[in-house]
Image (cartoon, helix red, strand yellow):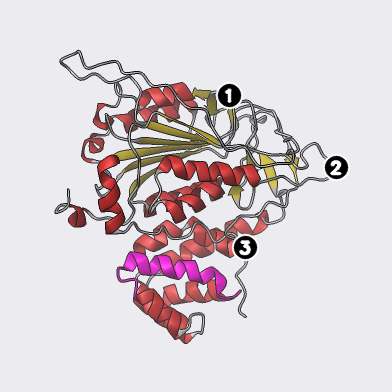
Amino acid sequence: MLGGMQDQHKNVLIGLRVKLIQEMEPDEIIEHLVAKKVLTPYMQEKIQSKGMSFRQNSALLDLLPKRGPHAFSIFCTALRDTNQEHLAEQLEQKVRKTEPEETCFPLSVEEQGGVRHWRESCERCIDNGDGPASVSPTTVGFYLSHYKQAYKMTTRPRGVCLLISNVLFATPDLDYRHGGDVDLNALKLLFFQLNFRICERSNITAQQMMSELDLFSKLPEHSKMDSCIVAILSHGVDGAVYGSDGKLVQLQDVFTKLDNAHCPNLQNKPKMIFIQACRGDETDQGVDQQDGREQTGSPGCEQSDAGREHRRVRLPTQSDMICAYACLKGTVSLRNTRHGSWFVQDLTDVFSKHAKDTHVADMLVKVNARIKRREGHAPGTEYDRCKEMSEYNSTLCRDLYLFPGIPPSDLQSST
């Protein structure tokens, strides 16, 4: 068996995956890789059967990390031989930057803001570091049987995705977020495959974060798209996240920027928000489960009807939002410095596999279930067997399916 490539090479491919998928010309590269026995003729046929270059590139990058320790260097050579030197140079430059970091840091750190808690952990990424799998497409049949009770989700792109990732901070009490780049790249790839236009901002101050959110809320493109995503990855406390200058941005201010008053172009459209940050400094030590079946029931929810007495339709100030948090109020979130945070690992895997036929709220329930099963490993410390629990809040008013792979041309005759 060939085995897999080195972790640093896998991580570099993850970091540049979106760019490679967008810019690579696959035909000649695949021929080179078959000639060098990195790929088999069967693999070549399977990749080329995907049709469009985007899908061929995605399939190739899924296979490459499993094709032996020399696959990365042969791939770079193939890029050069096919007049795509700029991609090879970017890959090799990233490798040079990551080489000295391999053994410099412990494997896992808390996201906790203000207090340092380094520790070793045996946590490993569920996909062995290859990055999120390709998103499975929705079938036309599933779309036709579910679109009537769901939010409209047919525009290309579906919406704009604002990714804010702070890993480097000006204040000494906020540690460098090793592994944060892995989270950023994983989410960037996931949302790109879900057909969102990516807008990325890294290491920006609290004021810059609010300015970016203000610009984002006023984008005229929102009027022509069906949804939006905002993801913030940083250190945090209860109700706020840190800018790179160590100042706090209140999450309520984030929600306000996206509400019906401040973002009218997204009224009645779903707004997805993901927060990878601590919400306090308590470590969840967990409790022993009692014998017997796991309790899965949840209390009901009372509803009230305000009536339809007014002539003009009015909206609540905030509606049609769903916000997922990495951890519960008052607790820390956990992050692996090589493979990223527990939350983003499970989020990207669940969405990749289930977005084709599961609405977002149910996918976040699946993420909760996975996080619930995770457990830290640090024998002899207070962090041994520590736990984490993600959660989400929702004001969605319809089912929110992302319907990946459904193009507008397939829908015009059916809607």
- Asked if 104 appears above or below 380 in the picture, the reply is below
* Residue type at the position of mark 3: Asp
Residue 158 visible, this angle? yes
- Which residue is found at the position 49% from the left and 42% from the top? 364
Give the CA distance from mark 1 to mark 3.
34 Å
- Residue 213 at x, y percent in the picture: 38, 30
- Residue 151 at x, y percent in the picture: 29, 39
Q: Which residues are magenta?
A: 49-70
Q: Give the mark nearest the N terminus, 1 or 3.
A: 3
Give the labeled residue for mark 3.
7
Residue 56 among magenta residues: yes
* Residue type at the position of mark 2: Gly
- Asked if 344 appears above or below 65 in the picture, the reply is above
- Residue 341 at x, y percent in the picture: 59, 45
In the picture as drawn, the residue positioned furthest to the right comes out as: 380
Front tag of 1 and 3: 1
Give the labeled residue for mark 1.
238
